[in-house]
Image (cartoon, grey):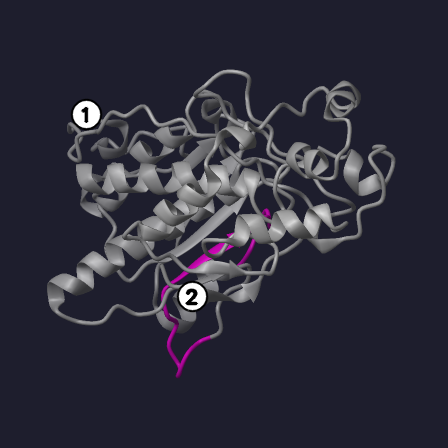
Amino acid sequence: MDDEMATASIGATEAVGIAATAPGKMAEAAVTNGAEEVEPTLNKMATGEEVDAFLHEEHPIFDSKKEEDVMTGKQYTSSELPLKPPFYIIQQGTPRSGSTFQVTLLNTIVNLKTQQWYDALGESPPKISLTFKTPPPSKGTQGPFVVKTHAKRNTWMNDLKERFGITTRVFTSSNLNHTHVNTSLHHQALPNMYNCSLCEVDSYVPIFGLSQEDVKLLKDFMSSYEILRQCCGLQQSKYNRYRLHGCNVTQLLIDQPDIHYPHCEQHDLPKLEKEFDALPLNPSQFKNNYSWKKPGDCAHYDKKIIAGRDFNNRKFVSCAVTHPWATHH
């Protein structure tokens, strides 16, 4: 897997992963200091079941009557789907709604389907920008992109339509079971993810025309991604960072009872890193120096934490949960 970087720097997003007490449950995350916030990092929830790539006509997303689906806030007809390259994607999520999970999944899907499309044409695929801002035009045109934003309203869609004649597709996430964004193709509801985060992959089958093989590959990828996000890097779970600092993590759980054990010690991380790196997927990544990028990074960042660094390379203060940025979750 190439270490291809995207065009924009990642914001201060702390993955204070909180593994659930039983397998198949979502791991929560905590917010950071000030206006910055943290996306929930999710634990492995693969069911091991493959889904049929072709849903029945009566599936809500193929409703020919265009009845509004409050779960997605979008009116569909089957003629719109599946989407085809080039992709212009906006992930619009509220803080702490699993938006990092959703944008990672969307970016991986978009890269996978773009590669397949251009392989069939015998051509090289275009680079897909992963960014927090609308990518700058390249030579007077707007290349494919995946944008992550918490902005409640923006004019990107109209601007891009007027300037380049392209149609952007919006996907949303929030803590609610519905969205007020009536252009959303799919709404990721946080309550649904507590039971099965990897089931989200199934929701994109009709939207992107995913095959059974695609679904299995994406679930394998996202399953490993969740573990590495919780257990590696300088944005890993608060519990695991404090464990590496030699703190009394039992007391941490008493002080912050919503932080649960992320099970990092139970994983063979060096083995997982190699397996993840060998997956035939190569999505672009947010550009930062805090997260996993290649095999060996888990041990590298663990040594930095043990030596006194902490979230986003800040200096570790103490095991007492007193500094402001450590008390949010």
| Three-letter amino acid code at the position of disc 1 | Glu
CA separation in Å, label 1 and label 2: 40 Å
Foreground of the two, 271 or 289: 271
Q: Is residue 140 magenta?
A: yes
Residue position for label 2: 4
> In the picture provided, is 131 more to the left or to the right than 115?
right
**SS at circle 2:** loop
- Magenta range: 137-155
Q: Which residue is mark 1?
A: 58
- Residue drawn at (78%, 22%) of the image: 251
* Residue type of the residue flagged with mark 2: Glu
Asked if residue 248 lies in the magenta stretch, the reply is no
Question: Mark 2 and mark 1 in contact (Cβ < 8 Å)?
Answer: no
Residue 59 in view in this figure? yes
Q: Nearer the viewer, mark 1 or mark 2?
A: 2
Q: Position of residue 27 (x, y in %)?
A: 54, 28
Earlier-in-chain disc, 1 versus 2:
2
The quadrant of the rendering that contains the N terminus is bottom left
Query: Measured along the vertical axis of the image, is residue 69 above or below residue 208?
Result: above
